[in-house]
Structure formats: C-alpha cells, structure tokens
Amino acid sequence: MHVHELNPKRTAITLLIFTAVIIVGLITLKSPRLKFEQDVNKTLEMIALDEGYVYPYEIADVIEGKADTVLLVDLRNTFEFAKGNIPGSENISSVELLNEDNIERLNDLKNKDVCVVVYANNQLEANGPWMILRQLGFDNVKLLLGGYDYYKQWEGKLADSYGDDAFLRGAPKYDYKELANSTKVAGSENTPKRSTIKIARKKKTSVAEGGC
Amino acid sequence: MNKNYIYLTLLMLILSGGLFFLPDRDNTKYSNPEDLMWSIVQPTRFVSTDAIAKMIIENDPTLELIDVRAADEYGGFSLQNALNMPLDSIVSDNYQEYLGIDGMNTVFFSNDDIKADQAWVIAKRLGFDNVYVMKGGLNCWMSTIIKPLEPEETASSEAFELYSFRKGASIYFTGNNIESSSESKKTTLNITRKKKQSVAEGGC
C-alpha cells in the first residue's frame, strides 16, 4: 500500500509545490546581461579587414573639431589620461568599459550613428577591448592604429603622417630564415634588414567624411 | 488507481514538452564578456621571449607553441616544434583538438604580438584555458634571443646575467657564437647595483 493513499491530499500538495517551484524558477531565470552577438567566424573576418581600423592621419580632422560624428575614447586609466590625451577624447578605462552606464552610453552612440574610435598607448593594449566591443555587436567601434604613442610622436602634424607606416604591425622586421641559419651571426653591428613585404596602403580618407 | 497520478504524469509530459521550445544556447563552457574583459585587462597572458627560450632549451613538455601566421610564413621559419594554425582557420575542427589539452600551456606567436593577441581573444572566448601570447613575437625573438644587444657598461648585473643567458640561447638556436668586440672589458665589471630596469631587459 502506498503511503500517499493514506492521505490523498498529500499528493495534491506535493503537486502544487512542484509546479510552484517550476514557475518561480522560470520567472527568476534571467539571461546574461551581455552576450556575444558576433559569430566567431565573423570576428575572424572582421579583424582581417581594413574596415575596423582607423589610421592615425584620419583623425586629424576630429582633433580639430571638424567632425561631430566621431568620438575618440581613451581606454587607459584616469591617471594616464590626465597625463596626456588626444584632444577631444573621452576617458573610459578598459576596466570600466562594460559597466552598465558605459554600455548604455555606447548603445546610445550606436543609435546616433556616431563612430567610436578607441585607443590606448598602442594597438596591442586596445586590441582586446576593441575585439570585445565588436563581438558584443558594437559595429560602430573602430580601433586607432598606433595609439597614443604614435599620436604623441606626430603631435601637431598628424595629417602629415600619411606616407609613414611605422604604426603598422604584423610585418617581419628581419629575414628570419637568414638570421637563424646564417653561418656567422654578427653581434650588434649588423643592422636589421627590413623585409620587402609590401603593405597595401589605404586610400587617403578621413573618418570625418563618411562617418562609420 | 489514484487519479492524481494521471494528472501528475500529464503535467510532467506537458512541462517536458516545453524543452523543445527553448532557444538554442551557446555551450556553457564559452566564457562571458565580463570574464573575458577581466582577463584582457591583466597582462598575465604575456610570456617573454626569454621564458620561452628557457622552456624550449629545457625541453619543457608542457609547452605547446602555436604559430598563427600563414602557412607560407611558417614554412619559411618558425620556432622549434611549433604547430602552424593560421589565424583565419583557428576555429576549424582540425585545430580544436590541439587547444585546451589538459596540463599543456599553449603559447601563440606571430611576427609581432597583434595577431597572436587576436588569436588569444578568440581562443579565450571559445573557453580554452592556459593560453598565452609571446610578447613581441618573432621580431622580439630575433632582437633578444638570436641577436641580443650587449647592455651598456653601466647596466645592472642582472642585465649582464640576462645577456649571457641570451648569448647562450643564441648559440643553442643558431649553433653560432656571437662576436663581441668588447667582451673582455665586460668581465671585469662586477659591482652590485641597485635593481633597475634596463632597455636590454625590457626589449619589446
């Protein structure tokens, strides 16, 4: 004989509790605050394209205040920002980038079609935060190549940096094969050999012209 | 038979039917954006070329080097025992089994560190742990390990120790001795100095 049959109401009570637990579970179930919107394959495509990057000479107009559809965002900490920054830039440090109000602000900027150009001291520092924002679906976020270090070097004559490609990364600086196999490796006297890899140059434009 | 049992069964069936309507969710092993951002703002993912050189020389079995450059660049030159996993095909199934092996430390490298860092972000998003980036990439490898610069005479003793390690490593990797014009002078210098970072140490 089943225990339940001694008290038929008991089954009903259990049933009620059971449904109540499931309903409460469904109501309190919340989706994560932030989700990756961009597919990993799309991300790989995006980082290989030119479209997500801004060349240093392209922001010359922005600094002069000619473009209001572009916002420079400094991802370094407040201390570094205070020591020196690109004129017209706003400081949102990487650590706080995903805070609720900053995400709200970024959403707002995205809806207004404002192009957000993020930078840090160099490309490497800003690479991660930029990739995250892109993967979260902020397609209006671009990465400033060269970063603040490069800007500092060309301060005041940024537009003239067209023609200079020192900010480009990824090319080999040496002939690795030769260096690693040469019978005689000289010390510091040997000047590094520049590789002959040609990098296709982007047409001279300004972000100010076309927005994003 | 108690009618309640029938109701109970029916309720269970209806509820389980609801599972079919649940939206597709990403596998839970994927990291969430906040965690990823947290690991991005920390520099712990970077490994110096010196540390890598040491691990290669000591035949560290936990080291897994991954060259994320294109196949032809990999064919030209790469580090010892490095696997080639071009960045654009890193998510393909052929390569997934090489990532996230228990007890292995995966180190990405490219010509410098941008591509390797991008590969790192992708790998991290896919939920792989123990992935690292070789700071400065092959350019730094060449300028620190293969062709180390002699520290200035006024540099700290640590800088000289590092230099002698690099010289040794260079011989190990190329089989050649580095010619040094003023080596005899260096040996007499043996003053302990304040700990100070030198250009030669930092490198890239």
Image (cartoon, coloured by chain):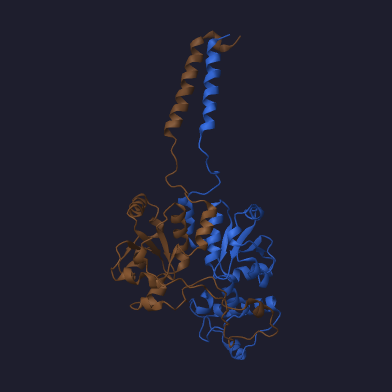
Would residue B14 be found to the left or right of residue A28 on screen? right
Tint applied to chain A in the drawing = brown
Residue under the image location 66 percent in, 60 percent down: B62
Asked if residue A106 can be seen in this view, the reply is: yes
The tally of labels here is: 0
Tint applied to chain B in the drawing = blue
> Which sits in the foreground, B159 or A113?
A113
Would residue A44 be found to the left or right of residue A55 on screen? right
Q: Residue furthest left?
A: A65
- Asked if A76 appears above or below B169 in the picture, the reply is above
Residue A210 in picture, x, y percent from top left: 36, 63
Residue A59's image quarter? bottom left
Would residue A31 be found to the left or right of residue A61 on screen? right
> Which sits in the foreground, B181 or B16?
B16
> Which sits in the foreground, B10 or A68?
A68
Residue B155 in picture, x, y percent from top left: 51, 82
Residue B53's image quarter? bottom right
Asked if residue B41 can be seen in this view, the reply is: no
Residue under the image location 33 percent in, 55 percent down: A109
Residue B78 in picture, x, y percent from top left: 65, 70
Residue B140 in picture, x, y percent from top left: 56, 74
- Asked if B93 appears above or below B70 in the picture, the reply is above
Looking at the figure, which quarter contains the N terminus of chain B?
Answer: top right
> Which sits in the foreground, B83 or A16?
B83
